[in-house]
Amino acid sequence: MQQPAADYATWKAGYDHHGASRKEHGAIRDQVLQSADDPNNLLVLIEFGSMADAQAFASAPSLKQAMSAAGVIGAPDISFRERTDEVIY
């Protein structure tokens, strides 16, 4: 999910607070990446146990509430992907 935030520190506190909900929806791991040009432009990668878990999390009312409270600007770009390959160097 790609999302611009008003302020990274505020967003991060809200993101951390919402962590229990991610786990309840089957999240396995996540990564937060900041744009090199704008630290408030974020890419969040969350891996779930199943596609159904990911879709349920994305449609949960608590997610929209958490994003609003954390200062997400506008609608986030949420997309679903399945891993087809992985190489660890």
Image: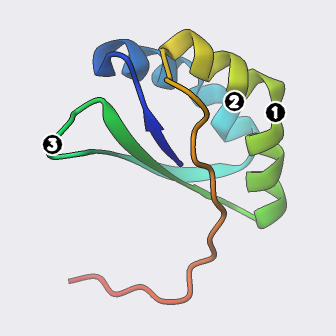
Placement of the C terminus among the 4 image quadrants: bottom left
Q: Residue at x 47, y 23 (%)?
A: 16
In-image side of 11 versus 36 (left or right): right
Tell me the residue that label 1 is attached to.
Answer: 60
Which amino acid type is shown beneath numbered disc 3? Answer: Asp
Could you tell me which secondary element the residue under label 3 belongs to? loop
Q: In the rendered image of this protein, does residue 70 appear above or below residue 83?
A: above
- Mark 3 neighbour class, 10 Å CA radius: few under 14, some 14 to 19, many 20 or more: few
Which amino acid type is shown beneath numbered disc 1? Answer: Ala
Q: CA distance from mark 2 to mark 1?
A: 9 Å
Q: Residue at x 83, y 46 (%)?
A: 56
Residue 28 percent location from the top left of the image = 58, 54
- Mark 2 neighbour class, 10 Å CA radius: few under 14, some 14 to 19, many 20 or more: some
Residue 84 percent location from the top left of the image = 56, 88
Q: Earlier in the sequence, mark 2 or mark 1?
A: 2
Could you tell me which secondary element the residue under label 2 belongs to? helix
Q: CA distance from mark 3 to mark 1?
A: 31 Å
Q: Are marks 2 and 1 in contact (CB under 8 Å)?
A: yes
Res 4 quadrant in image: top left
Q: CA distance from mark 2 to mark 3?
A: 30 Å
Residue 39 percent location from the top left of the image = 22, 33
Tell me the residue that label 2 is attached to.
Answer: 21
Could you tell me which secondary element the residue under label 1 belongs to? loop
Tell me the residue that label 3 is attached to.
Answer: 37
- Mark 1 neighbour class, 10 Å CA radius: few under 14, some 14 to 19, many 20 or more: few
